[in-house]
Amino acid sequence: MTLGGTAYFWRGLRLLGKPGIRPFVIIPLAINLLLFAVTTALLVDRLDALFAWLQGQLGDWLAWLLWLLWLVVAAIWLLIYGYSFALISNLIASPFYGLLAERVERHLRGEIRAEPLSAGALLALTRRTLARELHKIAYFLPRLLGIVLLTLIPGIGLLAPLLYFAWGAWSLALQNLDFAADNNAVPFPRLRERCRQQRGLTLSFGALAMATFSVPLVNLVAVPAAVAGATALWVERIADRES
């Protein structure tokens, strides 16, 4: 049976519990726990300040409009929170996610890695994955800025939550698929081309990732689950596609 994009995310969650994969999740989870404490505190503080400002601007007689605006703004902030959480987590923990993707791929292909990773190999992996993350950020951020500027246009701003969610779904799918692509020496532009050939599959995976990354506490395990699920998606649906 052919799996859809969302099914691969849930499959990634199940893969995290496999005995040969579980040890590679511990460090990313520890990093995410620290990151969660910082980003969630900032989110709550900023939302409280924004709500107080809106209340001061509208007054009590427009309280119904205040709550409507608060819901829209809160939705946008949660999307920004989820996207930022994933972006920072992947940047900080990229070497460990690279190892996790490698272990998941070996598990799926029935391979067993007998030799331990040397200090030199780990250092080389760290340099490679960090350079790759910076390359991806250079691709993501200018396009995100373009979407932000687009939503400032009157009328289009009403579509801001939808535009942010769609972009987040696409970029987070690429972000997580790229760990397996990088392990297999596939350049990031070639990965994007392969994903464009299966846009629906890619976007459906990224949409569920975006939704779960925006939920506090859930995002602690959702990020490594997305890496594992994206690796399964890479192995079974994307790796062998002609570019």
Image: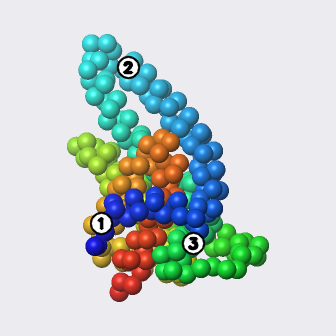
Of mark 1 and mark 3, the one earlier in the sequence is 1
Report the front residue among 90 and 152: 90
Describe the colour scheme in one phrase: rainbow
Q: Visible in this render: residue 84?
A: no
- Mark 3 highlights which residue? 103
Q: Give residue 83's mark.
A: none
Residue 3 sits above or below residue 73 on the image: below
- Check the image and name the residue furthest to the left: 155
- Kind of residue indicated by mark 1: Gly
* Callout 1 secondary element: loop
Q: Residue at x 29, y 18 (%)?
A: 63
Residue denoted by label 2: 55
Q: Seen in the image, is 82 located left or right of residue 120?
A: left
- 70 and 202: which one is in front? 202
Q: Are marks 1 and 2 in contact (CB under 8 Å)?
A: no
Q: Are marks 3 and 2 in contact (CB under 8 Å)?
A: no
Look at label 3 and name its amino acid.
Arg
Measured Cα–Cα span from mark 1 to mark 2? 44 Å
Residue 4's tag is 1
